[in-house]
Image (cartoon, coloured by chain):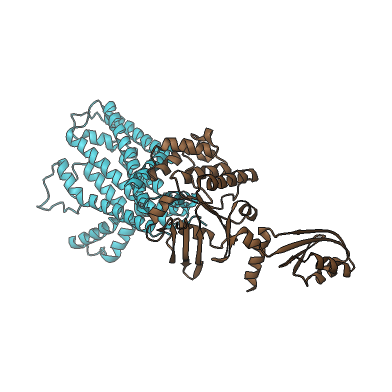
Chain colours: A brown, B cyan
């Protein structure tokens, strides 16, 4: 079986500005793929190319084997897009908005399909209300229903939780992961909110300045790195300086955080004692995505 | 096309629910009704009945008899504003709100969006202008107690079609500007500025240019040749403006006594017999002007189409 989404050397250039540079990745069927990166990294441009909205300068991408360059209409038949701003017509009702999408996609029995999907995203009572009266979270959920109308095999979300309150974001993430798990819909979502990506994504690509700088399953990105948080009584600065033998060290309030490529608990304790400090507490863990993200970006700046 | 039908339906739903549609409809209807009453009153005051002239209904309809601005004058102002109101934010508002991305992420070709929008604008303009004109004719019949003859009815019909076309020219221009400018406020202001210039400043400009290109000497008195040359240049420059074209068209179509749109030498032996033209003759006289309006509409529509097709539309609009 071919990959649900396959990007091969995607590149988009605006004049002298390279928005996306030689980006390749595969997304398997039923997978939730996270595209992570700071603002301006090229996530939205990549997504726009995957939906066939803008043609790539060079390279190509395939959705279910259909080229976005040569068959953009076929691609758009299979991809449901939820842009950061769902862009509903505010003076039309939810039903009228969804009906338009149904017509644009030649959906059979549109009324039934709309009723079913609107229940699914929990907006049953709101079908005949003008979208202008919806909260941002409700619009996002309606956006999911809108993207699902055509019965897509791939769903693409651009910053799905941006500007939504925590409860709304929670609901969004739940809907997204249930779509992937229960209906085997492939999901690609872009975000700069790490903890959310961390929670639902099977695989992650980190983008910066138009390039993918790291890619893989969560475990692999977090693999081989260890974090040690130390609470110490004594001269923090001296101790921190000595600990630099082991790896990267930073001070977080009263805590010293050591990041290293190996298990260094014993050595750290020894160094603390030798420096005249008293270890009060020690927490040893794998790094969070935020820390990986930061260290990847820092490494990138360094080169 | 499937896509353009869906877009057309959505555009109509949006237009008919919009406040600016209601406002424009009310404005045109009120100005028409006001002109009809004033016109009927002044005709009665002058003691003119349907026996006075077979064209009296035209006078009543156009509102030319009263001292108030005529209905035709109101239309010449409100029809362009209607077109601009429908078109000025047609594309750029959808880009700003993100709905364009939602439309285009569906399996339709991009041209169906702009085709649907153009068609919807034409329909709305036809509904407003055609509807109001029909109401005014009805009101005129009630006020005067008699209806138009066939010739008069046809004239009013052609005039209505021409007014729709004139409004459509401004609609297509505004639509083009809404693809060129990102901000709706900019496209609105540029549309209105162009309209004001072409409606109110084109004549001073044309006479000014003509005075330079074909000056009329004060002494000795200008020859007929010089006067004709000057007039011809003034007229040619002024006719760049669709407003001038529309003005000439409405006078030909609504006044059977207008027998030529060129300069006529009063003592010329070739002067046509001073009789009224039939509706077919008036129509024949106005065909070049009608073609000019059709050409302007086509030009701006094509420009809007091209600009829209070449536009870079991303999933987020910053």
Q: Is residue A187 above or below residue A264?
A: above
Residue at the location (22% across, 43% down)? B253
The spot of residue A102 in percent (x, y) is 41, 42
Q: Nearer the viewer, residue A110 or B175?
A: A110
| Residue at the outermost right position | A276
In the picture, measured across the screen, residue A171 lies left or right of residue B22, that is right
Instruction: Indicate the quadrant containing the C terminus of chain A: top left, top right, bottom left or bottom right.
Output: bottom right
Q: Is residue A93 visible?
A: no
Q: Quadrant for the N terminus of chain A, please.
A: bottom left
- Residue B124 is situated, as x and y percent measured from the top left of the image, at 35, 41
Q: Is residue B218 or residue B183 the one in the foreground?
A: B183
Location of residue B64 in the rendering, given as x and y in whole percent from the top left corner: 28, 38
Q: Tell me if residue A231 can be seen.
A: yes
Q: Can you say whether A112 is above or below A17 in the image? A: above
From the viewer's perspective, is B14 left or right of A201?
Answer: left
Q: Residue at x 72, y 63 (%)?
A: A226
């Amino acid at each position: 079986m071919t990959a649900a989404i396959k990007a091969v050397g995607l590149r988009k250039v605006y004049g002298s500005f390279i928005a996306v540079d030689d980006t390749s990745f595969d997304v398997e069927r039923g997978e939730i793929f996270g595209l992570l990166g700071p603002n301006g990294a090229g996530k939205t441009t990549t997504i726009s190319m995957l939906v066939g909205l803008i043609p790539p300068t060079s390279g190509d991408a395939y959705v279910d084997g259909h080229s976005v360059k040569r068959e953009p209409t076929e691609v758009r038949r299979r991809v449901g897009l939820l842009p950061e701003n769902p862009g509903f017509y505010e003076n039309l009702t939810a039903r009228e908005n969804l009906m338009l999408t149904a017509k644009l996609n030649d959906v059979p029995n549109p009324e039934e399909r709309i009723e079913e999907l609107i229940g699914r995203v929990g907006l049953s009572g709101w079908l005949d209300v003008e979208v202008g009266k919806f909260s941002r979270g409700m619009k996002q959920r309606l956006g999911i229903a809108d993207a699902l109308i055509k019965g897509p095999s791939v769903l693409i979300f651009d910053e799905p939780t941006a500007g939504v309150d925590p409860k709304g974001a929670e609901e969004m993430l739940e809907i997204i992961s249930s779509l992937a798990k229960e209906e085997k819909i492939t999901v690609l979502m872009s975000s700069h909110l790490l903890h959310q990506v961390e929670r639902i994504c099977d695989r992650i690509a980190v983008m910066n300045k138009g390039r993918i700088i790291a890619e893989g399953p969560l475990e692999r990105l977090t693999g081989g790195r260890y974090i040690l948080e130390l609470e110490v009584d004594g001269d923090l600065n001296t101790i921190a300086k000595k600990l630099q033998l082991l790896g990267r060290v930073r001070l977080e309030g009263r805590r010293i955080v050591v990041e290293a490529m190996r298990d260094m608990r014993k050595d750290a304790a020894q160094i603390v004692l030798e420096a005249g400090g008293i270890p009060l507490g020690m927490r040893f863990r794998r790094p969070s995505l935020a820390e990986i993200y930061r260290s990847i970006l820092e490494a990138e700046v360094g080169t | 096309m499937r896509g353009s039908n869906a877009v057309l339906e959505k555009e109509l739903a949006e237009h008919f629910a919009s406040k600016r549609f209601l406002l424009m409809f009310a404005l045109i209807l009120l100005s028409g009704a006001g002109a009809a009453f004033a016109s009927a009153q002044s005709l009665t005051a002058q003691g003119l009945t349907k026996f006075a002239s077979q064209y009296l209904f035209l006078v009543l309809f156009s509102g030319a008899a009263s001292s108030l601005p005529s209905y035709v004058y109101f239309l010449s102002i409100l029809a362009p504003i209607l077109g601009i109101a429908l078109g000025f934010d047609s594309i750029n508002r959808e880009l700003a709100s993100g709905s364009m991305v939602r439309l285009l992420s569906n399996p339709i070709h991009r041209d169906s969006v702009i085709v649907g929008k153009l068609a919807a604008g034409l329909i709305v303009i036809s509904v407003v202008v055609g509807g109001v004109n029909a109401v005014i004719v009805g009101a005129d019949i009630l006020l005067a107690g008699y209806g138009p003859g066939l010739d008069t009815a046809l004239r009013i019909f052609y005039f209505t079609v021409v007014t729709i076309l004139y409004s459509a020219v401004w609609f297509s221009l505004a639509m083009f500007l809404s693809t060129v400018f990102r901000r709706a406020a900019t496209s609105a202001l540029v549309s209105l500025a162009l309209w004001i210039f072409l409606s109110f400043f084109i004549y001073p400009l044309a006479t000014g240019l003509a005075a330079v290109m074909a000056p009329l000497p004060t002494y000795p008195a200008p020859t007929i040749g010089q006067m004709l040359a000057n007039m011809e240049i003034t007229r040619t420059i002024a006719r760049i403006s669709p407003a001038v074209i529309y003005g000439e068209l409405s006078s030909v179509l609504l006044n059977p006594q207008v027998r030529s749109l060129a300069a006529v030498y009063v003592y010329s032996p070739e002067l046509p017999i001073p009789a009224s033209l039939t509706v077919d003759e008036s129509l024949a006289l106005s065909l070049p002007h009608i073609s000019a309006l059709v050409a302007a509409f086509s030009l701006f529509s094509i420009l809007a189409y091209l600009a829209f097709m070449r536009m870079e539309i991303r999933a987020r609009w910053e």
